[in-house]
């Protein structure tokens, strides 16, 4: 169903993102760097290790799920690798990279000079932050409840 579609999307999106990041220009000291060697080296020094870790965790978790369905005897201990699902949530940290987008949006709104737009943008940002914190805390309490109940 929808969960399987999301899993497949995740298994294709993040590896594609790694490939695209080797061709994505970046700003350094006010200059746009478009040299492919510089781009690759910058990516390897910054986000590559994190991205490849997330992808490997994703593939490992998918493999463990597949192994768990097909084998009930020899590889049974590997099914206990459900902790990999927790590690997959590290992808959320990847979104922090998008923080630059937030700064750009703020600058755009401020440059328009409309006070109501600045207020609306700030309120939306606060609501999203509150929603994210609430979601994370709810997930933690859900996990505590499942752990305590068995």
Image (tube, rainbow, N blue to C red):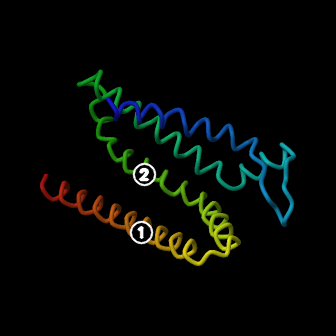
Spatial CA span between label 2 and label 1? 22 Å
Q: Which mark is on residue 89? A: 2
Residue 32, relative to residue 133: is it above or below? above
Placement of the N terminus among the 4 image quadrants: top left
Q: Residue at x 34, y 26 (%)?
A: 67
How far from the left and from the top, in percent, is residue 93?
51, 57
Q: In the image shown, does 79 or 46 lie closer to the viewer?
A: 46
Query: Tag 2's secondary structure?
Result: loop
Which residue is drawn at the image coordinates 63% and 60% (left, top)?
101
- Front-most of residues 78 and 132: 132
In the displayed structure image, the side of residue 79 where residue 60 appears, left or right? right
Q: Residues within 10 Å of mark 2 (few under 14, many from 20)?
A: few
Residue picked out by circle 1: 127
Q: Are marks 2 and 1 in contact (CB under 8 Å)?
A: no
Depth order, front residue of 150/105: 105
Query: Quick check: 117 above or below 48?
Result: below
Residue 31 position within the rendered picture, expressed as x and y whole percent measured from the top left: 86, 60
x, y percent for residue 78: 33, 35
Assign a secondary structure to mark 1.
helix
Ranked by sequence position, the earlier of labels 2 and 1 is 2
The 10 Å Cα crowd at callout 1, few under 14, some 14 to 19, many 20 or more, is few
Position of residue 81 relative to residue 69, above or below, is below
Count every numbered label the image shows and give the total.
Answer: 2
**Quarter residue 85 falls in:** top left
Furthest-top residue in view? 70
In the drawing, what numbered circle is on residue 15?
none
Please tell me which residue is depicted at 64% across the width and 41% down the height of the picture.
18
Residue extending furthest left?
149
């Amino acid at each position: 169903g929808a969960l399987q579609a999301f899993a497949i999307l995740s298994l294709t999106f993040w590896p594609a993102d790694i490939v695209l990041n080797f061709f994505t220009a970046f700003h350094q000291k006010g200059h746009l760097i478009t040299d492919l060697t510089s781009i690759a080296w910058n990516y390897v020094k910054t986000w590559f290790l994190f991205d490849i870790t997330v992808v490997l965790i994703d593939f490992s978790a998918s493999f463990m799920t597949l192994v768990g369905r097909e084998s009930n005897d020899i590889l049974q201990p590997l099914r206990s690798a459900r902790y990999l699902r927790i590690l997959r949530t590290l992808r959320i940290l990847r979104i922090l990279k998008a923080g630059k987008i937030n700064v750009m949006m703020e600058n755009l709104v401020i440059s328009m000079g409309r006070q109501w737009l600045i207020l609306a943008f700030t309120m939306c940002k606060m609501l999203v932050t509150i929603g994210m914190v609430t979601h994370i805390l709810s997930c933690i309490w859900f996990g505590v409840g499942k752990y305590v109940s068995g």
